[in-house]
Image (tube, rainbow, N blue to C red):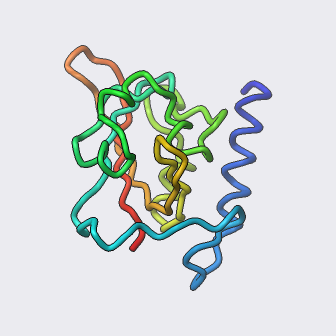
Amino acid sequence: MGEKEKRSMSFLKSRRKLIYPGNSTSYGFNSFNVISDDVSKDQKVVLTIDEHGKICACNQVGGKLLECLPSELVGQPISRVLPELTDIKLFQGTRSIPELLDLSRIGHHFEVMCMFGASYAGYLFFSDITNNHGQNRLRLIICPVR
């Protein structure tokens, strides 16, 4: 494992220690907004991420929640939407790294950045998928915190 991967793993492990039950808006970094009530509870951002951390696809609702057209996100690094994932290698071989799955299971709030600078808290759910060409991808669902 290279130095960059070691730093990434260390960062993710430290984020896990910053979870404080009952504290809904601050998780070891700046507090962020809870998304407005005009977005229904069933609206979620659904992204497909390639092995290089680039966004391959975004649903229409995701574009609305991220204040852009879904096509504007294609080719952008996932860190553009989720700054906590900057310099994080998302895959270990053909699978997503276990630390990401751990953070989603424990209900960690991630900061979600919209295209024009607004931000809100979101829960993340990860799923490993393979596209029609046999390429490994990561399905990422962002559920805004209410």
Q: Is residue 52 above or below residue 106?
A: above
| Residue 91 as seen in the image, left or right of residue 132 | right
Q: How many marks?
A: 0
Name the spot of residue 115 as percent of width and height, x first: 47, 41
Front residue of this view, candidates 80 and 138? 80
Q: Among all residues in the image, which is located at the extreme right?
A: 3
Q: Is residue 126 above or below residue 6?
A: below
Front residue of this view, candidates 9 and 54? 54
| Residue 123 as seen in the image, left or right of residue 127 | right
* The image quarter in which residue 134 lies: top left
Name the spot of residue 67 as percent of width and height, x first: 37, 45
Residue occupying image coordinates x 68% and y 58%: 15
Q: Among all residues in the image, which is located at the extreme top?
A: 133
Q: Among all residues in the image, which is located at the extreme front?
A: 116
Residue occupying image coordinates x 22% and y 42%: 60
Name the spot of residue 20 as percent of width and height, x first: 65, 77
Residue occupying image coordinates x 31% and y 42%: 63
Residue occupying image coordinates x 34% and y 50%: 141
Q: In this view, does 115 lie above or below 5?
A: below
Please state, as top left, top right, bottom left or bottom right, where the C terminus lies in the image: bottom left
| Residue 28 as seen in the image, left or right of residue 23 | right
Please state, as top left, top right, bottom left or bottom right, where the N terminus lies in the image: top right
